[in-house]
Image (cartoon, grey):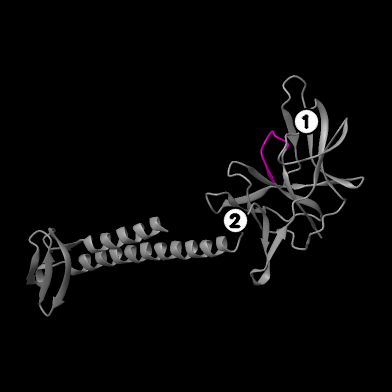
Amino acid sequence: MRKLLFLISAFSISLLAANLKLYMKDGSYQIVREYKVEGDRLSYYSVERGDWEEMPVSLVDLKRTDEEAKVRQDRIQHQAQQISDEEAVAAELRKEILKIPQDPGVYRLLEGDQLQIFKLADASLHGSKGRTALKMLSPVPIIPGKATLETLGEHATIAIKEPRPEFYLQLSSPQDSLAIVKLTPKSGYRIVERITIEPVVNIPDEERDAVETFTKQLTDSGLYKIWPQADMPKGEYAVLDYTEGKIDARIFDFRIE
């Protein structure tokens, strides 16, 4: 906001300081602040001498002077409209941000500015040793081999009828990543990602069925808008807030009907 006000202030100063060329019929010109025609005389404010002067209109190439003055005025109006448009967009963005809670999580604006809040889904790591509940405050045991990150149930509670919904995600940490992924239902669970942990290095390789999305950062504190680039087919999905390589995804599930 302060940056925008500075730009408007600087633009206003530039308008006040803008000068014109008053062209003579002999090809020369004078730098003037403004001019006006009164009968057969032309009055002008000379930038060089800092005072009002006048001369016969017959000495001035008014057509060339007026054309250049119009070009300058059109440019000023265009720049003013750009600033006005930017201010309108900034105002709408501020209103949009105020509608979203600052608490980490996923939200969706419905008709009438009604807010839909998504619950954090339970998650578990399913490997050769069985299932282990994924707890955000404790590290996941790293066991070499293959595993899947899953969430309980074959269907999400929240059903969305529009194929290209927009979500707001307040990240748990500004350094986190975000994504929309397609989930794979299987025996009472839905697979969020497939994980391979190589022996010795113990670095997990996480594979997700990611949806191609657009993202827009709204605040420096980690508020984002995320939405799919194309219509999503019917099925199970989730918005993820995660740290790459740590198997710590926060899962906010939904289904497209």
Instruction: Depth check: give the residue in front, 191 or 29.
Output: 191
Q: Quadrant of the N terminus?
A: bottom left
Query: In screen coordinates, is 150 left or right of 204?
Result: right
Dot 2 crowding, Cα within 10 Å, few <14, some 14–19, many 20+: some
On residue 141, the disc is: 1
On residue 102, the disc is: 2
CA gap, disc 2 and disc 1: 31 Å
Residue 111 in the image: x percent, y percent? 67, 70
Determine the residue located farthest toward the top in the rendered image: 200
Q: Quadrant of residue 248?
A: top right
Query: In screen coordinates, is 17 left or right of 129?
Result: left
Q: Amino acid at mark 1?
A: Pro
Residue at position x 17%, y 64% in the image: 33
Asked if 167 appears above or below 175 in the picture, the reply is below
Please say if the residues under marks 2 and 1 sit with CB atoms less than 8 Å apart: no
Residue 204 in the image: x percent, y percent? 74, 30
Stretch of the chain drawn in magenta = 241-247
The secondary structure that most of the magenta stretch takes on is: loop
Query: In screen coordinates, is 27 left or right of 174?
Result: left
